[in-house]
Image (cartoon, coloured by chain):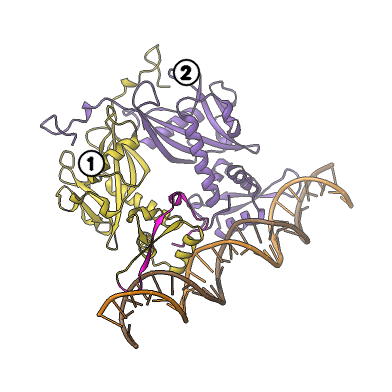
Chain colours: A yellow, B purple, C brown, D orange
Amino acid sequence: MNEKASPTGFDPKSYPPVLVMVDAALFTFHEGRLLVLLVKRSNHPDMGKWSLPGGFVDPEHDISLEDAAQRKLREKTGVVPPYVEQLMTIGNRDRDKRGWSLTVCYTALIAHQKCAPGIDTVSDARWVGIDEIDDVELAFDHRDVIAQARERLKQKALYSIVPAYALPEKFTLPELQRIHEVLIGKALQKKSFRRRIQQADLLLDTGLKRQEAGRPAVLYKMRARSGRFTFVRNLEE
Amino acid sequence: MNEKASPTGFDPKSYPPVLVMVDAALFTFHEGRLLVLLVKRSNHPDMGKWSLPGGFVDPEHDISLEDAAQRKLREKTGVVPPYVEQLMTIGNRDRDKRGWSLTVCYTALIAHQKCAPGIDTVSDARWVGIDEIDDVELAFDHRDVIAQARERLKQKALYSIVPAYALPEKFTLPELQRIHEVLIGKALQKKSFRRRIQQADLLLDTGLKRQEAGRPAVLYKMRARSGRFTFVRNLEE
DNA sequence: CTAATAGTGTCTATTAGACATTATGTG
DNA sequence: CACATAATGTCTAATAGACACTATTAG
């Protein structure tokens, strides 16, 4: 219906260009809080506001969207997070005043300590507690993206142990339960939480323990495919 | 890090263009079979092969991606399906020989009879049984898209009644169970299936019945928010 | 010893699976 | 009546919630 002009078929380049970006909501868990990484915009539009790490896809260097997203994350954190999953794509006429714009958004998780140590000392990137995000001026529609990413993570906390990727490689069950509780927004039964994980055999006992106060806790690490495992029965919200 | 050239900041238009498309895997259920709508490509590349309904986003006319997807679907079926959900976005250097290309893919569901009656008589669009898809020459990476859409629908069949959107507005519980069984790929317990739906109060008794052979079945329709409801406990695969 | 935290035992409640049984239509 | 399909009754099995209990460290 749109193909009327050229007889040799249709020339895609006759369309005005679309601005194509990738953005990533990178979460981590530190000192009992869920944090998201923000970077300060140094260019128009929305200069000076905070935004998710991301930017334009570079067709000359990026092989794929995943590639582009990983590159943006590596530029900000120094490493590629162990969990990167496509969240959704937003594209419309009005989200960027430079033109019709589209962003492919990713959710990513990483251990706090694995990030470039620079992050906390550099002024153009910072971790923000998810509950303080309302006080931050965010660029574009990134507030919506963060909200959606958080909602998806909450769902995953109900039926998987994906949130473990926001912890160090070795972690304790109380730590894992804690991040699930923060995501779900309610206290969980210790017994239920542990039972299902142990029954599904998702974690490997490292033989090490961590002690802070009271009885030392066993340090576990994830088994190979545990990130993809889903329980048939969810925890209750 | 990429912003080095222009002093006034960064010009997105200095990047080579990305081809931006939307594609939709539209499913329906008819005579016990899950069908997907394919259209024959009339242009290069992949001319003559079958593809998902879709095409280039038109920044001058499409307000948003959802808008573009709905437009493409309306062009092929005459109506906008009652269920359209973003599936995923694929973008890379090699999927389209015309250049770096990106497609935002949607999963859609519709009642078979609600489509333009033309579909079955027109040669450039046809419903294909999902199990016969291996025998069809498909354009681009659309085979992957269909596989992913199907997998996601299967998951939804395990924890929701979203598949009901592939049925007419009024449908019977045996019909709904049938499409769930096809998606999940296994027979379900009638009692379990009905019990959970009735307990969650997802359907409305229309007072009508449908009879084919044996006892007439009650015709139901979906309640307002039933499509978003999720059971806490899944059916087993 | 107490305080603190990790981890277990065990009972109940919910709900899916299995499968027999009853209900309601046609011819 | 027989047949076909719809719908229900009822038992079992699996597993999450609740919460009391035991275990292991520090001081």
Q: Chain of mark 1?
A: A
Quarter-of-image position of residue A103: top left
Q: Dot 2 falls on which chain?
A: B
Q: Is residue A165 visible?
A: yes
Near-viewer residue (A65 or A203): A203
Q: Nearer the viewer, residue C21 or A157?
A: A157
Per the image, the residue denoted by label 2 is: B47
Q: As shown in the figure, which amino acid type bears the numbered disc 2?
A: Met
Q: Residue at x 48, y 64 (%)?
A: A195
Identify the residue at horizontal 44%, vertical 53% (top origin). A223
Residue on which the image places disc 1: A75
Q: x%, y% of residue A185?
A: 37, 63
Left-right relation of B7 to D2: left
Which span is picked out in magenta? A213-237
Q: Residues within 10 Å of mark 2 (few under 14, many from 20)?
A: few
Q: Is residue A189 visible?
A: no
Looking at the picture, do discs 2 and 1 lie on one chain?
no
Which image quarter is the N terminus of chain B in?
top left
Q: Quadrant of residue A16?
A: top left
Query: Marks 2/1: CA distance?
Result: 41 Å
Could you tell me which residue is drawn at 57 percent across and 30 percent down? B133
Residue A26 sits above or below residue B61 on the image: below
Q: Nearer the viewer, residue B146 or B32?
A: B146
- Residue A214 part of the magenta-drawn span: yes
- Residue type marked 1: Glu
Q: Residue B219: image x %, image y %?
A: 64, 49
Secondary element under disc 1, as helix, strand or loop, is helix
Q: Are marks 2 and 1 in contact (CB under 8 Å)?
A: no
Q: Position of residue A210 (x, y in %)?
A: 33, 66
Query: Is residue A2 shown in magenta?
Result: no
